[in-house]
Amino acid sequence: MIKTAILICLSLLQIVCYSQQPVISVQSFEYIWQKKLTPESVGNQVNILLPEDNKRVVENSFANAIRQRWNTEISPLKLTVKSFSSLTFSNTPKFNTKLKEKQPGTWYMFLQLFDDGGTVFYNEDGSLATPLQLKCKVVSFNDSVVFERILTVKMNIEKAPSDQVVLERLKAHPVHFIQSFDSLAAWLFQPENITRKEVWLKPACVYTLRKPASQPITQLLYEYNDSIVHHLTQPQFLFHSSGPAYTDKASHNNAGGNTVSGAITLFTGISIKKARVFEYTANFLFREDDNTAYNCIINYAERESSEREREKMVNSDGSKTYSLKSGAYTLAERRTDSQYLQVITRNADTTATFTISYRRDANARSFYKQMWDGMDSSTIIDLPAEWNNRSEEDDLIVRVKTAGHGFYMKTKEENTVKEFYINDTPALIIYGKTRPSKALLLQPVSVGDLKLCTILASLPYAYFNYSAL
């Protein structure tokens, strides 16, 4: 009887032991981010958004998802962060799952998150997306595969509001980015084997406290997209916008200068680029109705350059001769000079002329101390210096003359704020980079001037101020 009881106890103990979940030992947990290698990324490399505090949040997200899946003890997760260059032999980082030592009753987990910031997709609404690939492999002490999965998540970043300055070094607002890892971890470890998901993140924008110079009379509202600009408050008006239509005006090959620089390259071997300049006009159409249309005509120039190198040839008699080899022309810069006279016509009549002067001494980013998602004040946080923009767009002054009077527009915060002055007194502030989103009226403005200001606030000034350097 006693012997039977002992056998029963041993059997029950054996069942309990075999039914116990093994301990999960996390061997590696990597977050690898892809470096951008394009010339446009120089100085504004996207930040990984994972300082120590945020790393702990990500670790907790995955630890909770693992426990939820297997209801077992796991070793502490330690996230390592490193960069990856596609100039290696592979387009993706190596996923190392080799084990040195194994213990009975233990599962071994390998985790890798590859943030491919070098690959960018454009959604239909113009927003950007980058892929994030999650890999996980779990093996037992006897080398059998317990769990293996690859999940690709499309990380969509919502378009920033028109009146916001985007922080170019950040993928998205850090709070939204970190919170997304709860979903990522849950998807990776859910029982169903899914291979693709997507999330939407809020953008990272500069937050500044915008105070008008005087108390506004009222706020004006706009509705806009790529083809319309609609002023919603009284007096209402709507522009159907299109363009620009480009026209060639003239070309300048700088023959004399190119000849001299070519001679220098030929005789010294010092490479000097040759250049040519083309002049254009860009015509932006703002149609109000079937009988009324405004045309905004901007004159500008493009300079193209070509590399030249000296080639050496050794003749049969041992003498040497030299020749010039030129490369293809590429765009070096695009400019509209402050002396160029720009025009706004109403039907066939000139209603205004204006000039554009860029303020190249601007240093707006030195005032960027806080950030948010561009809409929700609860997302306002401090902006660390290492996350700030490394450069900013030049602001500008547009001086306007009409038949009756003159006024000017001065921009700040990288052309997202456009201040209009009449008789050197602030009259109107329009918010929006290339399309007005809202405005503050500081003094009465005629309907005609309001329409001109709306047109001037709807132009892509950065296009006419480009340098490849």
Image (cartoon, rainbow, N blue to C red):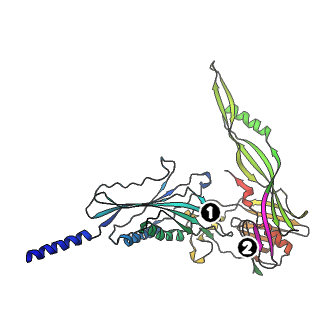
Which one is in front, 381 or 65? 65
Q: Which residue is mark 1?
A: 123
Residue drawn at (16%, 72%), measured in percent from left and top? 10
**Circle 1 — which element?**
loop
**Which residue is denoted by mark 2 in the rendering?**
223
Image: 130 above or below 37: below
Q: Is residue 154 magenta?
A: no
Closer-to-camera residue (376/427): 376
How far separated are the C-alphas under marks 1 and 2? 21 Å
Left or right of residue 250: residue 375? left
Q: Nearer the viewer, residue 324 or 147?
A: 147
Span of residues in magenta: 222-244
Would residue 394 be found to the left or right of residue 196 on screen?
Answer: right
The label nearer to you, 1 versus 2, is: 1
Image coordinates for residue 36, horizontal then vertical, percent: 56, 54
Residue 79 visible somewhere in the drawing: yes
Q: Main secondary structure of the magenta part?
A: strand
Between discs 1 and 2, the one toward the N terminus: 1
